Amino acid sequence: MTDSMTLDSYLAAGGVLTNPTNVPPRYRAELMKLMATFVDSELAGAAGFADIINQGPGIKERIAAAKIVLEKTDNADRVLKIMGEFGADTQRYATHHPWTARLDRDADIGASRSEHDMRLAVFNYPLTGWVDAVVMNLLMSRAVAEQLAEFSTVSYQPLAEAFRSIAPIEAHHGELALEGVVKLVEQGNDAQLQASVDYWWPRVAVSFGASDSEKFKTLQAMGLRRMTGSELKARWQAETTRVLNQLGLSAGPG
C-alpha cells in the first residue's frame, strides 16, 4: 500500500491484509461474520452427522460418516483459531452453542439463522436416516464447493489460505456422498432418494443468501466477495442438476 492510498482504496484495488492490526471496524465485523458462519455451520453439520454414524448400512459407510464428522470439526478449528486472533473466546466457543439443536422437519425458516449461533439455516433441519443424510451431504457439499471457491480469494490472507486448504477436504466429502448415492440407486432406493432431494434442494439453495446489491458492493470493495449469491447459486444449480440427472434423479423444487 502506497502512502497516498487509503486502506479502503487499497482493498478495493485488490490489496490483502495479513494480521488483525489496523483492520477497520466494518471490515473486522464482516470478516468475523463470515468466519462465524463457516465455523458454526461446520460444527452444526458435524453434530448432525455424528448422530447418523451408526445408521450406516455397513462398516465402510460408518467410517465415511465418522471421517466427515472428524474433518468438519477440524475445519472449524482452523478458522476458529483465526477468529481467536481477533479476540474470540475459542475455548468457550465450541461448547457454548447447542450444535445438535434442530427444528421440526416441516419447519420453514427460509434463510433465517438460529437464535443460538450463526449456522446456515439448512443446518437447523434434522436428518431422518441414512438415505436422507447422504442426499443432504451430496447437495450441500456441492454448495460448499462453490462457496469455498469464492472465499478462498478473500482479502484477509490467512483466512484465504485456510479456506484453500479446507476446500479439497470438503470436496472429498462430496465424493463420499456421490459414492453413497450411487450405491443407494443400485439398491433401488430411487423414490426415497428423490423425496430427500425434493426436501433438501430448496433448503440448500437459500444458503447462498438473498441478492442484496448494496451489501454485495460493500463486501466487494472490501475484497470479501467477488461473485453474488445469485451467481454462485446458479453455478450450484447447473452442476448439481447435471449430477442428479446422471443418477436418474431430478433437481428439487424452487
Image (cartoon, rainbow, N blue to C red):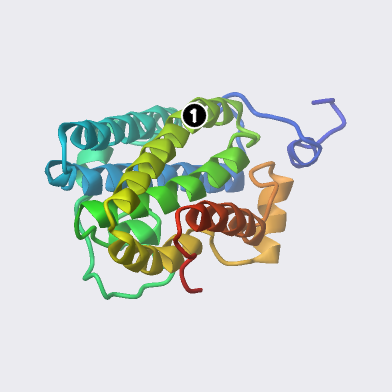
Q: Is residue 219 above or below residue 111?
A: above
Seen from the viewer's position, the closer of residues 193 and 24 is: 193
Q: Position of residue 123 (x, y in %)?
A: 33, 56
Q: Residue at x 37, y 46 (%)?
A: 182
> Which quadrant does the N terminus fall into?
top right
**How many marks can you see?**
1
Q: Position of residue 51 (x, y in %)?
A: 16, 47
Q: Is residue 81 left or right of residue 51?
A: right
Q: Residue at x 51, y 58 (%)?
A: 245
- SS label for mark 1: helix
Q: Is residue 121 visible?
A: yes
Crowd around label 1: few <14 · some 14–19 · many ≥20 (10 Å): few
Q: Is residue 167 above or below residue 249?
A: above
Residue 190 occupies which quadrant of the picture?
Answer: bottom left
Seen from the viewer's position, the closer of residues 116 and 166 is: 166
Q: Is residue 134 visible?
A: no
Q: Residue at x 16, y 32 (%)?
A: 59
Which residue is farthest left?
54
Q: Residue at x 30, y 42 (%)?
A: 43
Q: Is residue 55 left or right of residue 121?
A: left
Q: Is residue 57 left or right of residue 162?
A: left
Residue 212 occupies which quadrant of the picture?
Answer: bottom right
Residue 61 occupies which quadrant of the picture?
Answer: top left
Q: Position of residue 126 (x, y in %)?
A: 23, 60
Q: Position of residue 58 (x, y in %)?
A: 16, 37
What residue type is disc 1 on? Pro
- Return the residue at label 1: 168
